[in-house]
Each structure stands twice: as C-alpha cells, then as structure tokens.
C-alpha cells in the first residue's frame, strides 16, 4: 500500500500545484471561493421560505411582498389598537359628539373634565383601588400555590406525585360553572374558621389560588430546568427550601412573569364570582361596579371610567412583554 512517505518532495510539490490550479487545495483561492459558495447555498436553503432569494431580487415580487407586509401590519394595528384608541378618544369627548360622529376626531374640542368626574365624583378611585387589592391578592395566592406545588411535583418528586399530578390534570376537565355552588357554600361557611368570608377579599383570593392550569404550566417549566444544578446545590448542603428560594425561583423568571400577567388580568376582568361574594358596593371591583353605574351616569363619563379601568392591563403588558418575546430566565444559570 502506498503512503505519503513514498513520494519524493518533487512529486509532492507537483501534486500541490495541480490541486491549487484546480481549486481543491485547502488554502487555494478557488477552494475558499467554493467553500463560501457552499456555505451561502446552505444558509439560503436553511432560511428559505415560500420565496427564495432569487425570487426576492425580482422588482415585481419584491415590491408586491413589501406591499402585502405593509397592508398586514396596518391591519393588525387597526384591529389591535383601534378599539383602545377609540376608547381613549371617546373618554375625553362630549357625549353628543360621540353619539353623532363617533369616528370624528374631537369635532367640538376636548373635554378633560370627564376623567376627573369619573375619578372623584363617581368614585371610580375607590373601585380602582379595590380592583388592585383583588388582583394583587389573587396574584399572590396563585404564585404561592403554583410554584410550591410545581416544585414539589417536579423537583422533590414524592412517592405518589404522579397520582397527585393526574388528579390535578383531571380538574382541568371540570367546568368552572359546576363549581360555583359548592365553592359558594364553602366560602359561606368555611371549615375550621366558623365565620363567613362573604364581603371580604379573602373570598376572592383563596379560590383564585386553586388554579390547576398554573400548577401544570409551572410544573412543565420546572421539568425542563437542568438537574445538574439541583444536584450541585444539594451537594453543597442546600435544603429543599434553600433550593426552591435561591435556585429554582431565580431561574423561573420567564414563567413567573407569564403566570403573573395571566393571574392579574384574569382577576381584573372577573365578574361573576366577585359579584356573588362581594355584595357591599364599597369593596366591589371595577368589573362589578361599572355595569351598575352605566345607567346612572352620562356616556362620556362612563367611557372615561372604562378608559381608566384599562390602564393596569396595558401597563402590565408593556412591562412584561419581554418575558413573552424572549426567555432570559436561564441566563447565567449554567456556565460554559
């Protein structure tokens, strides 16, 4: 068998020259060009969609694609932001202008007094603070129950964890309307307390914590966390609580942000359950109080109150939108 050591230096030089002339040598210009072309074709084939790069170079297809993109973008903006922008405009527009020309842009000027009237005269400020307390308490209970239950089922893994997890999944198939009567009776006469929770925020906070969807969501996220970090923490002497507080929760910022937004928005718009358990108007949230006030106040003031009630969900989206668009919770958790 012939090896490279059988060739003389003169023969090796001739073979190298021939390879460079044909562009096959590793360091030759032709070889580098060929590798660049292959790399470019591989990138184009990996990123290719319905239209290839060659198709997008054609003027007709390029301008047609840009036009379609622009039309879709404008349509999404109109459909998504249109109702909110119209509500913001109507909140500072007199009633007659809203009824006569609802799509006109301030035909008779701006009436900023609608906001102050809705806030102070109609006492939307009281219902606004009630809604904040309801949302914060519901959020705290849901985060507490979901994180601890997800941590126990995913990380601690008790002996009967699969049975418990199956029961939790089974509750997802039970309609919430079916649970209204037994849940109301439980709040009316809670065990061990001996005192009714009606007309207290606890009547809304405690049932909000029993969210099987959040438990499943966080448990699935915990399942994807690297187990090597848990083992290293246990080796260093971290107990279950220290592992949960110092390792798992800091790595779970994305899912905690998502669950937080879902929890607060759900509590913000909930109507039926607060209507049943919060009978006192002084502690009712906006979702319950605004329909009652609709017949007693003018349209412009009512629209101003509706605009005020949308502030918190909009602010929440602006604050937590990064958690929906990227997953940065594991950054720095694993080195290398």
Image (spheres, rainbow, N blue to C red):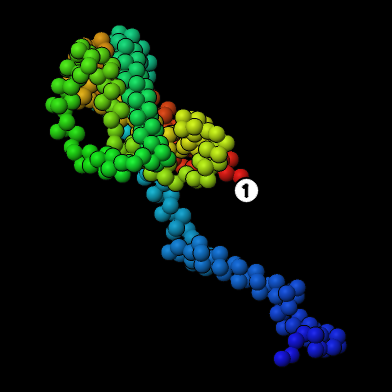
Q: Give the residue displayed 60% in from the left and 71% down from the top.
A: 38
Q: Give the residue displayed 34% in from the left and 13% down from the top.
A: 125
Horizontal and vertical percent position of residue 58: 51, 66
Can residue 105 be seen at all in this image of the molecule?
no
Disc 1 marks which residue? 336
Can residue 22 be seen at all in this image of the molecule?
yes
Horizontal and vertical percent position of residue 282: 25, 10
Query: For residue 158, what is the image quadrant?
Result: top left
Q: Nearer the viewer, residue 111 or 1?
A: 1
Q: Give the residue displayed 45% in from the left and 63% down from the top.
A: 49
Residue 102 higher or lower than 6, as above or below = above
Residue 169 higher or lower than 48, as above or below = above
Check disc 1 and report its element: helix, strand or loop. Answer: loop
Q: Nearer the viewer, residue 289 or 60?
A: 289
Q: Residue furthest bottom?
A: 1
On screen, residue 259 versus residue 283, left or right, reads: right
Structural crowding at the residue carrying mark 1, measured as other residues with C-alpha within 10 Å and reported as few (<14), some (14–19) or many (≥20):
few
């Amino acid at each position: 068998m012939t090896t490279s050591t059988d060739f003389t230096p003169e023969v090796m030089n001739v073979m190298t020259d021939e390879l460079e002339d044909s562009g096959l040598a590793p360091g030759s210009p032709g070889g580098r060009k060929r590798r660049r072309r292959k790399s470019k074709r591989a990138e184009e084939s990996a990123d290719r969609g319905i239209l290839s790069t060659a198709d997008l170079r054609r003027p007709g297809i390029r301008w047609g694609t840009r036009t379609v993109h622009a039309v879709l973008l404008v349509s999404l903006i109109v459909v998504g932001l249109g109702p909110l922008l119209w509500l913001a405009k109507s909140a500072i527009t007199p009633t007659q202008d809203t009824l006569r020309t609802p799509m006109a842009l301030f035909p008779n000027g701006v009436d900023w007094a609608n906001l102050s009237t809705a806030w102070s005269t109609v006492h939307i400020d009281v219902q606004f603070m009630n809604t904040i307390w309801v949302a914060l308490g519901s959020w705290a209970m849901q985060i507490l129950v979901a994180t601890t239950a997800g941590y126990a089922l995913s990380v601690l893994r008790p002996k009967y964890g699969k049975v418990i997890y199956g029961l939790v999944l089974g509750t997802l198939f039970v309609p919430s309307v079916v649970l209204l009567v037994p849940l109301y009776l439980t709040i009316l006469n809670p065990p061990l307390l001996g005192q009714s929770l009606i007309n207290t925020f606890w009547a809304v906070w405690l049932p909000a914590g029993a969210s099987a969807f959040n438990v499943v969501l966080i448990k699935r996220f915990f399942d994807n966390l690297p187990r090597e970090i848990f083992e290293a923490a246990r080796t260093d002497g971290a107990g279950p609580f220290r592992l949960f507080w110092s390792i798992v929760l800091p790595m779970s910022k994305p899912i905690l942000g998502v669950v937080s937004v879902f929890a607060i928005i759900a509590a913000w718009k909930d109507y039926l359950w607060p209507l049943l358990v919060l009978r006192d108007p002084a502690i009712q949230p906006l979702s319950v109080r605004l329909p009652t006030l609709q017949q007693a106040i003018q349209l412009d003031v009512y629209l101003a109150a509706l605009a005020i009630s949308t502030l918190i969900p909009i602010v929440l989206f602006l604050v937590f939108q990064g958690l929906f668009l990227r997953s940065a919770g594991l950054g720095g958790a694993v080195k290398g």
